[in-house]
Amino acid sequence: MIHAWEVGTIVAIVAGLVGFFVVLRSSAFPAHAIPNGAFAGAAGASLIGASPLVGLGLFAALGALSIAWLGRRTRSDIATALVLIGMLALGAAFLSQSTAYEPQVFALLFGEILGVSSTQLIPIALLGTAASITLLALYRPLLLGSVAPELARAKGVAIRRLDLVFLLIVAAVTTMTVPVVGTLLMFALMIAPPAAARSLTNRPAIALTLSSLIALVVMWGAIASAYQMNWPVGFFVGAYGALSYGLARLWRRATRN
Amino acid sequence: MTTPVLSVSNVTLAYGDRTVLDDVSFSIAPGEFTGLIGSNGVGKTTLLRVILGLEKASRGEVLINGATRSRSERAVGYVPQRVSIDPEVPLRARDFVALGLDGHRFGLRRRQAGDHALVQRYLKAVDALAFADTRVGELSGGELQRVLIAHALISQPSLVLLDEPLANLDPRSVQEIVALLHRVAKEFNVALLLSAHEMNALLPVMDRIVYLTQGRCASGTTDEVVRADVLSELYGHHVDVLRLHGRVLVVAEPSDDVDHLPSHATLNLDN
Amino acid sequence: MFAPGFFSSGSVHTALLLGTIVAIVSGLMGVFVLLRNQSFGGHALTDVATTGGAGAAYLSVAPLVGFVTGAVIGAGAIESLSRDRSQRRDVATGIVLGAATGLSGLFLYLTATTSSATGVTQQVLFGSLFSVSSSTVPVAAVTALIVTVTMALVARPLLLSSLSPDLARARGLRTSWLGLLFLLLVAVAVGLCAISIGSLLATALLIGPAATAMRRSRTITGAIVMAMSVGLAATWVGIVLAYDSFTWRATGQGLPVSFFVVAIILAFYALSHVPLSRSRRV
């Protein structure tokens, strides 16, 4: 049980960091598509008896690469939609062939607080740390490249490569979600807290920090409530995330006048 | 002879069978205020993008401070015509200018106090202190333009390219911006190359004019270039150059080739 | 090619009828969704429809009602939180989607713990065209008709406001109301799809055929017709293959319709990238 708090903390901090850029780049769709598609990988992996985490990671990476590749040939939203439906179709096919318990499928999607074992803690911590360090190392070029790509290119920043690396980071972060939040709700953690944070400040570094902080609060609240009511964590993440955004918007409106 | 800050040699760029830039050659000395003049669609933006390395020329060479581009990326600043930033982006004007310093650097080096003072200095130089803490996405067009100029200048390049900075501005704003650019160019000893479809506002401050039409160019001082014989040869048909109250008007004889007429020049008789 | 019993099966008839209705409506709405750059919104509504579907399962209400209600509420929420600027809409869609997904998780959990129904998650998410009751068809047909007629009435103003909101406003059009109406119509269309092939894959029929059509067609009408055709072809062939697939393996376990439909749509899309003539690339 303790592990849920530790894992939840790591997941929330990383989701906040990555989410700051997801919102900045208007990349909510890919951030949603990659976890969804990754789910297909987990289903496929359990079909052949492999570790769902590996399947998750592989398909997440595959999704990121496909979106980047297809995004060069067509509009990015179309690319994302097509990759999403392709992977979901595969997921449907895998599921139809497997005898996966309904609870397993459910847990993959929506999270299961009691399902966290101590062996999962290390890989998640490692993955989370690696993703965070990479992101912080890329902070400035990614910031400029997201806000004014032409200017970044004129300064010699390799925009295309950066775009791809970012999607891969989203994929890596997605892989962390299985134990606690579920693939579908990792997305909520990457959108609502950063969206709330940017309503509270004009300064990028502070917005970045607040993204993680708010994600933490949302996550802890969700875990506590899930214990209390025995309902899925994901539900509370979605609800508290929306609440935090609403409150932040109200605050901004109130302090502007 | 000092090394020119920019040296464009025989640059040609063709799309299929459409030639956009045809054997364009000119150079800019350090600190020179240069106007790239030509009507809309004549290739000014393309030329700027080639100089910036954002597009590849079919032929020809661009040297910045005597070196090819890849070794001198930091030496050229860029102020694009339009940058649209969402008002919800949490980035203040001063943060944006600071990115001009280190927006390309990987790693998380903490900004020193010196950086902050530098940002202040450049904000002050472009008269942007009043809105330094406002979100970039909430600035007006003119305010954003000044922030972009500061962003380009702060990395201390030897050359700054500006793409149509005077377009869509009322005459008074044009005067203000030209004065500002002239001032900062002198203050920071930086060469400027700005594109415009109308030269009159720049006449008082231009050291050099690069006159572009149909992909070909003539380069020199205004007196050397804006002359009937030079421009007629450039256009390929006869044009007259009239001067009135310090303004210049380039007039072509009525011809079938309407596409190649120069765009209108303002004629301010009240001056 | 056609497995035994295909033509006489009642569930196949239902599947074909429902699939036809769904493909036609999705083709129409999909073209406008792409024109308005609202693919994320369209997809989000299919997921939000899931919430409605999960709620319907929990409350033992008709699935179509649940799906459509969920999507309509979602559309209203997204539209009211958005403004013209793209990031606000992107965020609003994400927030509503996140909250709705969590809610559907709750509904599914409650259903699983309070009733003995199995496979509800899969049912709601992926649907099963072969197990929809035939009474759904007339309701779906009427709903589709209403959507189509409404679209026909607002087509021109909607097109103008999609291509240039400023121009539309200058002509006196209320673009925000048009936007809301459109998103509500998408919600209803999406609810229809969700019933048949599952909410997660309703996106496929909404976006895929339209994306293919927009690459090939030069007119809006042409794109709509082509999108409908691609959707229809994918759905019919998908149904045939899915029914067939039950006979492919000894276990009698086939592959879902949604899998085949998506595969065919993606194949069409890939084909749309193949250059028709040796035109010179600029």
Image: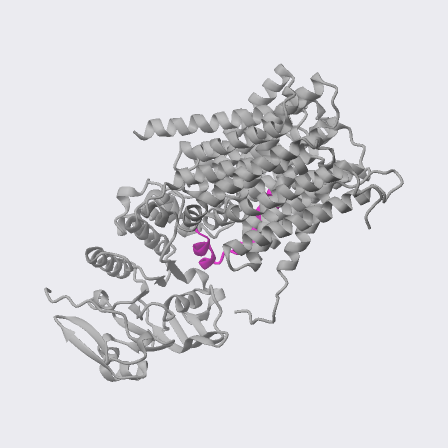
Asked if residue C57 is among those painted magenta in the image, a careful observer would answer no
Colour convention: one colour
C33 over A233 or under it: above or below: below
The reply, left or right, for residue C172 in relation to residue A119 is left
Q: Farthest residue in the right direction? A: C250
Query: Residue A23 in the image: x percent, y percent?
Result: 49, 40
The number of numbered discs placed on residues in the rendered structure image is 0
B53 over C26 or under it: above or below: below
A255 over C91 or under it: above or below: above
A101 over B265 or under it: above or below: above
Answer with the quarter of the image where residue C6 lies. Answer: top right
Query: Residue C135 in the image: x percent, y percent?
Result: 67, 30
Residue A18 in view here: no
The reply, left or right, for residue C205 in relation to residue B157 is right
Q: Farthest residue in the left direction? A: B270
Question: Which one is in front, A103 or B124?
Answer: A103
Question: Which one is in front, B18 or C7?
Answer: C7
> Is the stretch drawn in magenta largely helix, strand or loop?
helix
Answer with the quarter of the image where residue C29 lies. Answer: top right
Question: Which one is in front, C179 or C113?
Answer: C179
Q: Residue at x 62, y 59 (%)?
A: C272
Answer with the quarter of the image where residue B38 lies. Answer: bottom left
Q: Residue at x 81, y 45 (%)?
A: C244
Query: Residue B138 in the image: x percent, y percent?
Result: 34, 42
Query: Residue A8 in the image: x percent, y percent?
Result: 61, 27
The quadrant the C terminus of chain A occupies is: top left
Q: Residue at x 67, y 46 (%)?
A: A86
Q: Which residues are magenta?
A: A148-170
Q: Residue at x 63, y 52 (%)?
A: C229
